[in-house]
Image (cartoon, grey):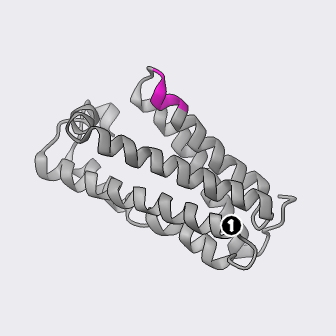
Amino acid sequence: MEWVQGGFSPLQLWLNYLAFLPMPWLLLGVYVLRAEELTPSALAGALLYGAAFTYFAYTTLFALQSQAPNYEALWQHLGFIYTAHGAAMVVGGLLFAWAALHSRALPRLAVGLFAAGLLVNLGLAVVPAPDILQTVGTAIRNAGIVGMGYALLFDGASSEA
């Protein structure tokens, strides 16, 4: 919506906020359901990932309150702290993925997609690329989360998937 509209809108920011609300809990929920198979490093990764998304939800409310016109303006205002939370999201997510892959508690394909999406977003953050491309990494990452959720719901959490 931001790309099409040429900036933020209240509707887009509220939708973004609603989408961010469950994010801090997703990996933690996956961990809880597979705690016997996952290592403490998976828990650490889930907590770090969740903390980052708690901050990202706050930034959406901040954008609404400050009437930031677009992502660039928001990032300019938040700067290093925003970047630090982005790094925490990537590190936490990759730590969780590494632990999940080694434990074989979740489908390798789903965990691999999740990690690949994080790496795509990281790569796009460090090279000059249009912000719209971040949606590619986000879509890949979210496909991995959906795959993990599917496996948990239907007890297909084997490493074969």
Q: Main secondary structure of the magenta part?
A: helix
Q: Position of residue 97 (x, y in %)?
A: 67, 55
Q: Looking at the figure, which quarter contains the N terminus?
A: top left
Residue lying at 34% horizontally and 53% vertically, measured from the top left = 56
For the record, the magenta segment spans: 123-127
Q: Nearer the viewer, residue 70 or 29?
A: 29
Give the residue pinned by disc 1: 150
Specify the amino acid type for callout 1: Tyr
Q: Position of residue 77 (x, y in %)?
A: 19, 38
Give the total number of marks visible in the rendering. 1
Residue lying at 23% horizontally and 35% vertically, measured from the top left = 70
Q: Nearer the viewer, residue 114 or 78?
A: 78
Please say if 143 is above or below 48. above
Quarter of the image for residue 106 reads bottom right
- The verdict on residue 60 being magenta is no
Tag 1 secondary structure: helix
Q: Is residue 64 left or right of residue 123?
A: left
Q: Residues within 10 Å of mark 1 (few under 14, many from 20)?
A: some
Please say if 149 is above or below 161. below
Q: Position of residue 112 (x, y in %)?
A: 71, 48
